[in-house]
Amino acid sequence: MTAQTQQAQQTQQAPSAAPAPASSPERSFGFRTRALHAGGTPDAQHGARAVPIYQTTSFVFDDAADAANLFALQKYGNIYSRIGNPTVAAFEERIASLEGGIGAVATASGMSAEFLTFAALAGAGDHLVASAQLYGGTITQLDVTLRRFGVETTFVPSSDPEEYRAAFRPETKALYVEVIGNPSGEIADLEGLAALAHEHGVPLVVDATLATPYLVRPLEHGADIVIHSATKFLGGHGTTLGGVVVESGRFDWGNGNFPTMTEPVDSYGGIRWWDNFGEYGFLTKLRSEQLRDIGPSLPAQSAFQLLQGVETLPQRIDAHLAGTEAVARWLEADPRISYVTWAGLESHPHHARAQKYLPLGPGSVFAFGVRPTGQFDSPEEEATAARATGEQVIANLQLASHLANIGDARTLVIHPASTTHRQLSPEQLAAGGVRADLVRISVGLEDIEDILWDLDQAITAATGEAR
């Protein structure tokens, strides 16, 4: 090796300092990229690329002052996994990014996400306005459990924003809807409802579980708070419970309607959520009061599993939608079927609204009814026969699973009137669009030919009529 070559190699191994590169412009990453990367920076200590599972109840303080400041909300950090955990925080950050919110609070289930939100917004003597076309468990949470705590709810059996106007009272604290009604398939007019809620000085709270942020981001249409049962499509595999609440950061909590946001909080030394934390005030209250005191925290292991589901959310929803359209159109063309509630069909009364708010497609959960065979002496007799026929269709299915869930990779079916909405009165069932013969289907990712075969043979066996 010549001296010249050796010197060149040494120069390559220890180069002189290069000029600092010009700072690159900040990029706004796309949805699919954020579904993979948001909240998931590599572990600084060990370099792990996947989000680590912090399986611990609590976290070590630096010293006494550090502990005191954390408990007084004078600094951000981890105290106890009931309130916050790094794995859970990664999940919260990812969903907030996908929804376009300023932040999120994760919970143990979708029902707990709803309950914490209602508890943060309303107390004894307060009032909520809600759609009548909701999941049965949500209706009973509002109409039974919250009523016991002194919070009343008025349910509106309509999708027209003007029909909600008369339901508002001076003590109303929120308007609550599902963007896609479960199981009615009704599509909420988000912009009209947001305008109405804001006219009355209250937030629009939207359950977007059936849509996911891939299909619609309600905050972009005026909503203030979005709730998900992460158990469903976000997780996507029927293995893990979870919920999440996302806020826009745009609602004026200091408008005089929410004294719990502006008055001193005794348990935190007199701080005021709105004055001290501004746009983050509601989420800080939700975590530091409701999650702390009621305690439905999301386990770190569950947050990790949900993150795995979110990574493939766009790809899964694309496949769900393709299969759902094929199933819905196949059912609509079948003379044995009396109705199909998928808003992607041109015959659906909310088809135009679905195209506006859900241009990629109105999800993969909908309902249908099967015509009973025979002659009937009364509408009641026909309804009874229709219900029995629908139940028999479910009993005859060989591939689809009969269970109380949606958003699984597998096709799922259920008869809501006798299960998920069984606790509702006949009047509530009618207002919610839950007919006696209604069969709900959550279309999975199986080969579409197999799903259609399964439906066809089950309907044939139940009705005695071939397609």
Image: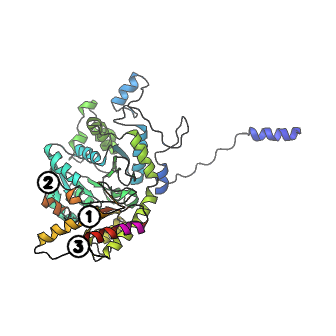
Which region is colored magenta?
448-454
Which quarter of the rendered picture does the C terminus lie within?
Answer: bottom left
Q: Secondary structure at mark 3?
A: loop
Category of crowding for the residue at label 2, using alpha-carbon neighbours closer than 10 angstroms: few (below 14), some (14–19), many (at least 20): some
Specify the quadrant of the image occupied by residue 401.
bottom left
Q: Amino acid at mark 2?
A: Arg
Q: Amino acid at mark 3?
A: Arg
- Which of pointers 3 and 1 lies earlier in the amino acid sequence? 3
Give the CA distance from mark 1 to mark 2.
36 Å
Is residue 272 among the parts visible in the rendering?
A: yes
The answer to whether residue 255 is above or below residue 69 is below
**Do the numbered discs 3 and 1 sit on residues whose CB atoms are within 8 Å?**
no
Q: Is residue 236 left or right of residue 130?
A: right
Q: Is residue 131 left or right of residue 327?
A: left
Q: Secondary structure at mark 1?
A: strand
Q: Which residue is mark 3?
A: 371
Residue closer to the observer: 185 or 188: 185
Q: Which residue is mark 1?
A: 439
- Which of pointers 3 and 2 lies earlier in the amino acid sequence? 2
Residue closer to the observer: 41 or 383: 383
Q: Is residue 333 left or right of residue 130?
A: right
Q: Which residue is mark 2?
A: 169
Q: Is residue 449 magenta?
A: yes
Residue closer to the observer: 222 or 315: 315
Is residue 187 among the parts visible in the rendering?
A: no
Give coordinates of residue 118: x percent, y percent: 23, 46
Q: Secondary structure at mark 2?
A: loop
